[in-house]
Amino acid sequence: MSTALHSVTSSKFGRIIWLGLVCYAAPLASATAQQVLPGIVVSGGTLDPGVIAPTGEGQPGRDTPGIPTERIGSSVTVVSGEQLRAAKVRDAGEALRSLPGVHVSQQAGPGSLTNVRIRGGEANHTLVLIDGIEANVNSDGAFDFSDLLVDDIERIEVIRGGHSGIYGSKAIGGVINIITKSGRGPITAQAAVDGGGFRTRGVAARVSGGNDKAWLSGSAQYRRSEGFNVAPRGSENDPWWNRTLALKGGFRPIAGVQVDFSLRHTKKYVSFDQEQFNALTGLNEATDANNRSLSEMFLGGAQVRWDLFKGAFTQILRASHNHTDLNSVTTFGQTQNISTLTKYGYLATYRFTTPMLLAARHSISGLVEKETEGFTPRASFTDGRERTRERLATVGEYRGEYLRRFHFAATVRHDDNTSYRDFTTWRTSISVPVPEVGIRPHASVGTSVALPGMFEQFGSILGTFTGNPNLVPEESFGWDAGVEFTLPGGKTKIDFTYFHANLKNEIRGFGNTLSNLQGESQRQGIEIALKSQLTTWLYFGASYTFLDAEEPSGKQEIRRPRHSGKASVTAKFHEGRGTFHLAALYNGRMKDDNFGTFPATVVTLNDYVLVNAAVSYKVHSNVEVFARVQNLLNQNYQEISGYNTPGIAAYAGVRFKFVDPSTLAWAKYR
């Protein structure tokens, strides 16, 4: 038995999870379903853009072409828009908490820096795409998930495991692919207002409409909170606000040609505390201070898709731009870091069949992509010089389906870099659904790479940090293997996956700078995911992750719990007009660095359980009232050493929806 498996089965929490899943699954094994779980299509994790098929908004097909999950060997979790609306989460960080293999670290409360790690990787090992546009900030290579409000999100795909063979740098731990709502359908106006704990108030509005010829969606979101006291021994609240504007649309000028575009602008203000040494505790802790930051992010992208030969041959020309401006004022002075990322690409996919040879279907894709990164530090103690680095990538992918059962994919990518040596990454995966017995073995293996963030190389914070221009890219080799079980009736699925990865040249802090560690870091673990439709009105979901993440020295990686899990229940009532959602999240003990000593020492953060509840009810076909309670048990916990987290808080609001009936027939026009 492997070390990881032994640790799971021998731990108290692990035994509870295993026993609970077995006890839950046993009685369902003989049950018959009234309705099978819906199929899920994934648009990330592959070059093949999928075949466009006419469907309504938010359903697999024309709005969101992709590949069915049963044909993909990667481990995938999809959070649907319906799930987001049931849980009444406000930002993407909340939505991702305790998903299989995923850990969220938030520096304080809503609005504060929120990092997402997948399978023990760093925050900059998670590639984030919003409508196909890379959202990572190249200053540190990560994405702050508190920036992303969820009111206009249709679904979130979490694709675990290294994917540099497709996407290049950053995709070591996995990919989070976010798709926002499209504009197809009758002309509709929606608005929502809510408020509650910590003097929080929010408003969101969206107008959309279109048919198969043209469609458009525009949205605006604004949230503001007076915050709470982050400092363990302070009294000052830390306010924040977020304003997000988005525009998404497309049109089909002629048969077979489709043009899509997406624009998104986020402006966020956050007040935050200063970290200082506390002689009474011997720890570095947040201390009341008048620090503040103002950030702006613009994401823009467009593509032209041309389908030929009845969809057998697809060509896509695409371009995107990411511009981020981060201004901070602290006790050490004022800083400004400007990051840019521009991409141009050409993708071609050819699909064909060989009926006489293994009844096979094939897909061959090729991509050429040019990428330019820019970084400009502006402060009195920096040189203010813009630095750029460029990459030219060529990618090839083959996907095959044999005997209507075996699904295989292989991808190779070569990146020609101006600032580092060139590198080649690859990935293969296999999925074999056997519906007759309700099992689907799946596996993947590949290599990945992550370039140093440009702030890590060239940034500076007076008295506390100096970049290291000699950093080299981090490199990873990883694999996973698992089995998905579908119980009789098709309404319950359970997936077990083991994963393992080695990381070379890990970048870690050393004094006031960064350096590459010698040797290999190890990450391994087990992911368990369960989803079930118990009745036509009751849904249950659960997940558990065991993670063993170690540095080359054998030291446990910080801010990565060995045990984490989640269980949730969603119930529909009163003929579907009402929805109740209850979720319990467990985060096991984990390590963190205490920089109150030199060198830094390690502290242990206690485990905790968070219980969140939400309820909504349609008082009218166009009016919905809702409420939610976060941290129902009022748990006192820390996700980062020295920083408080919010206690119990309640929120309530109302949502309005107006549909122009005169456009119902028009919206169906093709």
Image (cartoon, rainbow, N blue to C red):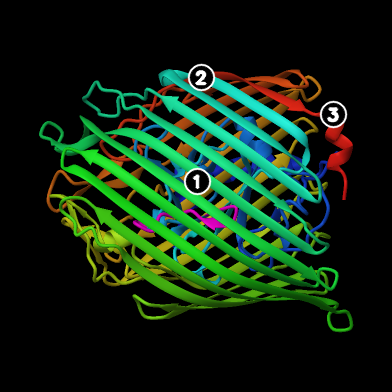
Q: What element does badge 2 sit on?
A: strand
Q: What element does badge 1 sit on?
A: helix
Label 2 packing within 10 angstroms: few (<14), some (14-19), many (20+): some
Label 3 packing within 10 angstroms: few (<14), some (14-19), many (20+): few
Q: Where is residue 295? Give x, y as percent.
A: 37, 42
Q: Read off the residue under disc 1.
A: 14
Q: Read off the residue under disc 2.
A: 195
Residue in the picture at 56% in, 38% down:
150
Amino acid type of the residue tagged 3 in the rendering: Pro
Amino acid type of the residue tagged 2 in the rendering: Gly
Taking depth in this image into account, of 209 and 455 the one nearest to the observer is 209
Whether 604 is drawn above or below 571: the answer is below
Which quarter of the figure has residue 49? bottom right
Residue in the picture at 34% in, 39% down:
294
Asked if the residues shown at circle 3 and circle 1 are in contact, with their CB atoms under 8 angstroms apart, the answer is no
Query: For the residues carrying marks 3 and 2, which lies nearer the camera in this image?
Result: 3
Residue 482 is a magenta residue: no
Magenta extent? 129-140
Q: Can residue 151 be seen in this view?
A: no
- Quick one: which residue is furthest to the left in this view? 279
- The residues tagged by marks 2 and 1 sit, at their Cα atoms, a distance apart of 38 Å
Q: Is residue 629 left or right of residue 84?
A: left
Amino acid type of the residue tagged 1 in the rendering: Gly
Q: Read off the residue under disc 3.
A: 661
Residue in the picture at 70% in, 58% down:
259
- The residues tagged by marks 3 and 2 sit, at their Cα atoms, a distance apart of 31 Å
